[in-house]
Image (cartoon, grey):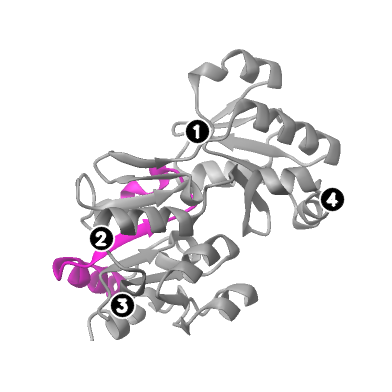
Amino acid sequence: MAIKLVAIDIDGTLINDQREVTPKTVAAIKEASKAGVKIVLCTGRPMTGVKAYLNQLELNDSDHEFVISFNGALAQSTSGNVFVNYTMSFDDYANWQTYCIKEGVKSQIETRDYIYTINRDLSPYTVYESDLVSMPIRYRTFEELSKIQDQYVIAKAMMVDEKERIDQAWQDLPKDMTARFSIVRSEDFYLEFMNKQASKGNALRVLSKELDIKQDEIMALGNAQNDDSMIEFAGLGVAMGNSIPGTLKIADATTADNNHDGVGQAIEKYVLN
């Protein structure tokens, strides 16, 4: 069956370690797009961290091109028409934030416009995220966030700390919190919490129904645990050569790493061939 939709993670997949899309990968994506194949960037990033790549790939500002962001909490056309919007309630955030304080783990939440943190001494990983996704940081106390909760919508909450500290906090996580949230590890220093319905795979499922594209007509490419749901959902799940062991294990196929045109090679082999 011919591939009609290619879902592509960004960090560690679409872009190399210099945060660039290589010329070979750009060319392969544009050729597939011109042939009518839907190219869908599926990322943990907010839209602010996606737009530059949409522009480069000539996919921006269209009612007929789509993006899945915030690890599946939001899905929309690149012109801004939203069809998936799984948000986190303030009560759920408050419960989660209390746990982060108890565990001594630094934290943040992301809305469509800002990163908010209650940590006066910013985590370096919050600063890194701000730079990565082109989103400004706002320090607010929990009390201040509570008072203005009607002014923002929480797309996801993140533990942002050293690997060992997050490992311990995840291990100690109460069962009721595990059941309440969709939880993904996007980096050693990021553990992300979202609405239970939010995942890249679920958002891709909704999009494929909207577009009348069958599951076996979808290829998904990724490298980390937050990509696993879409790799498992797609008819052809492809792991990058730089993927973590768990992602390599569930994939149907592998390609080169993100520094050696892995996405471009996979599109040439499975879509354009």
Q: Give the residue type at disc 2.
A: Asp
In the rendering, at what x and y percent does residue 159 appear?
Answer: 69, 44
Q: Is residue 201 above or below residue 92?
A: below
In the rendering, at what x and y percent does residue 192 appear?
Answer: 62, 48
Question: Residue 248 or 10: which is nearer the viewer?
Answer: 248
- Cα distance, mark 3 to mark 4? 41 Å
Residue identified by numbered label 4: 172
Q: Is residue 264 above or below residue 122?
A: below
Q: At numbered mark 2, what does the secondary structure look like: helix, strand or loop? A: loop
Question: Residue 22 or 269: which is nearer the viewer?
Answer: 269
Query: In the figure, residue 256 lies in which quadrant?
Result: bottom left
Q: What's drawn in magenta, residue-wise?
A: 23-52
Q: Give the residue type at disc 1.
A: Thr
Contact flag, marks 3 and 1 (Cβ < 8 Å): no
**Residue at position x 59%, y 30% from top?**
89
Q: Is residue 119 above or below residue 42?
A: above
- Cα distance, mark 1 to mark 4? 27 Å
Residue identified by numbered label 1: 111
| Quadrant placement of the N terminus | bottom left
- Cα distance, mark 2 to mark 1? 30 Å
Q: Is residue 269 in the magenta section?
A: no
Badge nearest the viewer, 4 or 2? 2
Residue identified by numbered label 3: 267
Q: Is residue 176 above or below residue 215?
A: above
- Cα distance, mark 4 to mark 2? 42 Å
Mark 3 or mark 1, which has the lower sequence index?
A: 1
Mark 1 or mark 4, which has the lower sequence index?
A: 1
Q: Give the residue type at disc 3.
A: Ile
Q: Is 109 left or right of 13, judged from the image as shown?
A: right
